[in-house]
Amino acid sequence: MKSDETNQYPLLREYLDLKGMPLKPAFTVGDVALMFEVSDRTIQSRIATGKLKMRDLPGRAKILPIDLEEMLSRLHRSEQPQSSTAIQITGPRPSHQRLHENAGHSIGMRLAGGGRQ
C-alpha cells in the first residue's frame, strides 16, 4: 500500500480499525449499518436527507469511502467547541448516575438521531 493511500480517509480508517473491519472500495447500506451499529433504515434516512451520499454504480448503488469520510468529518466537527471561549454550565449539576448513563453516546447513536447533530 502506498503512503498516500494510507493517508486517505483518516477518520474512516481509524473507525474501521477500532471495529476490526476492512476498508473497501465501496460499501452497501447493510455494510454501513453494521459498521455504525444502526439499522439499514437509519442509513437510508441519512441518504434521503442528504447527510450521506449514495452512488449509482454498476450492479447496485454503493456508498464510497470518501462519502463516509465526509460524514465522519461533519460529525467530528460538530463535537468540537464552536469558539475558544470557556463553556459555562449553569443550573444544577447532573448526578454521577446521569453522567454514567450519558457516557454511552456514540457515533451510532448520533446517526440514529439520539445525540447532537
Image: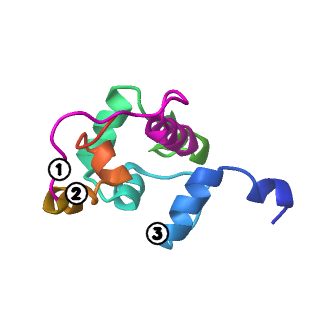
Q: Which residue is disc 1 drawn over?
A: 94
Q: Is residue 32 magenta?
A: no
Residue 82 visible in rendering = yes
Secondary structure under badge 2?
helix
Q: Which mark is residue 66?
A: none
Q: Which residue is mark 2?
A: 99
The CA span between labels 1 and 3 is: 31 Å
Which quarter of the figure is the N terminus placed in?
A: bottom right
Which residue: 34% across, 54% down? 106
Which is nearer the N-term, disc 2 or disc 1? 1
Instruction: From the viewer's side, name the closer residue of 90 and 28.
Output: 90
Vertical relation: 19 (above or below) 105 = below
> Which residue is rendered at x = 27% and y = 43% of the image?
42
Kind of residue indicated by mark 2: Leu
Label 2–label 1 contact, CB within 8 A: yes
Provide the residue designation for mark 3: 19
- Give the CA separation, mark 3 to mark 2: 25 Å
Considering the numbered disc 1 on the image, is that residue within a helix, a strand or a loop? loop
Residue 24 seen in the current view? no
Q: Please name the residue shown 22% across and 63% down the image.
A: 100
Q: Which residue is nearer to you in this view: 109 or 35? A: 109
